[in-house]
Amino acid sequence: CIGLRGAAGSGKSRIIYEFRRRKGRGLDSATPCLAGRADPLAHVPYGLFVDLLRDITGIQGEDSTPVRRRKLQALTRPLSLTDPTLKAYVPVIGHVLGIRYDDPQLEEAGPQSLQAEIHIALTALLRAMATHVYKQFELPLIIQLFDIHAADERSEAALLAILERLRSSVPLLIIATYREGYRPPREVGLSSRFSQYSLGPLRRQDVSTLVASMLDGFTLPEGLLRRLSQLSGGNPYFV
């Protein structure tokens, strides 16, 4: 798991984009890469994973329940060949996505039991996906999680549980971005399999290089570059 910490506009998302775009070193444009984003305004339980699951399944907000079920089945059916137990977790995964299934056991589950089932179901899904991807491409499954500082409590608890259950068991790379001031959960921060990188402001020379790349090599006057560096605070987005 890799953590990218920095202010808004500091280039966290761009680093992930360039990481995916680069060729060589066993990574190319065909490398399976999924994405989920935490939205503090969504007010949806497990919002980070709802967004991730929608990215995986292609489910859209306007899709009817039958269409959502078909899209979820299209994902889980082939993966069940890798892990036959995944079939039993389809109603639980559907529950996270707001898809209702006639499952008495799911309906009767208490809050803690339901949370545990969701953790197990999400873990089983990602394990099956990572195993399937590695068999097909001999590469790890890459999951991008954007803005986890804004994740709801249930999403953060699920992420912790998944990382614990998948530790060193499958070829999976998680890249998470978050703002300054956010501290990853202690269990993640102390893990030997977690690396954190902080993105600071650009130096004046870096600002000059960025501007030149945007202006097709044209160079601005030194005084204007200095002023631009001061006003932007070295933030790439503001530059």
Image: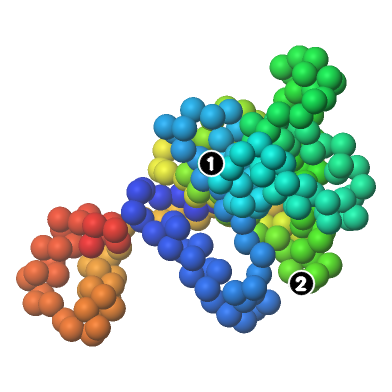
Q: Position of residue 121 (x, y in %)?
A: 78, 37
Q: Position of residue 11 (x, y in %)?
A: 39, 59
Residue under pointer 1: 61
Q: Position of residue 41 (x, y in %)?
A: 42, 32
Sequence-wise, the earlier of marks 2 and 1 is 1
Indicate the amino acid at tag 2. Phe
Q: Residue at x 68, y 77 (%)?
A: 26
Q: Secondary structure at mark 2?
A: helix
Q: Is residue 166 left or right of residue 231?
A: right
Residue placed most toward the observer, 166 or 144: 144
Q: Residue at x 44, y 56 (%)?
A: 12
Residue placed most toward the observer, 40 or 76: 76
Residue under pointer 2: 137
Q: Is residue 215 left or right of residue 173?
A: left
Q: Residues within 10 Å of mark 1 (few under 14, many from 20)?
A: few
Q: Can you say whether 184 is above or below 198 in the image?
A: above
Q: Secondary structure at mark 1?
A: loop
Residue placed most toward the observer, 136 or 154: 136
Indicate the amino acid at tag 1. Gly
Q: Residue at x 82, y 37 (%)?
A: 89
Where's the C terminus, which quadrant?
A: bottom left
